[in-house]
Image: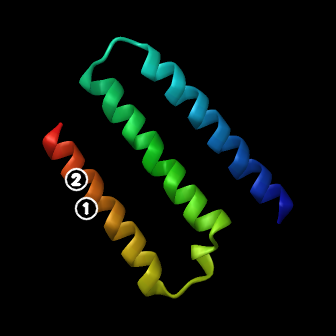
Amino acid sequence: MKEKSFITFSILILFTIIGAFLSALPLSKTIVVSIVIFSIIKFLLVAFQFMEIKKAHFFWKFLLVFYIIILSSVFFVFL
């Protein structure tokens, strides 16, 4: 169990560093989309690994993923 948490934590740190480097580049639509995708992946990793949504009822898993899909879709439409 600790190995999964360590791997997830390492991925979160890696995505944070990549996002920081991407934010230093000149602003473009591709960079913004990449940062948002990294943020979505980080959110899902934290929710399923550390908040233990993976052990929750299917309804809560569906609601979480549905929320992310709706929120990111709205964001990408306004981009």
The picture places residue 16, in percent across and down from the top left corner, at: 58, 35
Residue at 62%, 81% (x, y): give it: 55
User: Is residue 48 shown above or below 11?
Assistant: below
Q: For the residue marked with disc 2, what is the amino acid?
A: Ser
Q: Is 58 positioned to the left or the right of 34 in the image? A: right
Which residue occupies the foreground of this view, 46 or 30? 46
Which residue occupies the foreground of this view, 65 or 25? 25
Give the number of the disc on residue 53. none
User: Is residue 5 shown above or below 61?
Assistant: above
The picture places residue 44, in percent across and down from the top left corner, at: 51, 58
Give the number of the disc on residue 73. 2
The picture places residue 75, in percent across and down from the top left corner, at: 23, 47
Q: Is 77 positioned to the left or the right of 59 in the image? A: left
Which residue occupies the foreground of this view, 61 or 50? 50
Secondary structure of the residue carrying numbered label 1? helix
Q: Mark 1 sits on what residue?
A: 70
Which image quadrant: the C terminus?
Answer: top left
Q: For the residue marked with disc 1, what is the amino acid?
A: Ile
Q: Outermost residue, right direction?
A: 2
Question: Within 10 Å of the Cα at label 1, are there few (<14), some (14-19), or many (20+) other Cα atoms?
Answer: few
Q: Are marks 2 and 1 in contact (CB under 8 Å)?
A: yes
Residue at 40%, 42% (x, y): give it: 37
User: Is residue 61 shown above or below 25?
Assistant: below
Which image quadrant: the N terminus?
Answer: bottom right
Residue at 46%, 21% (x, y): give it: 22
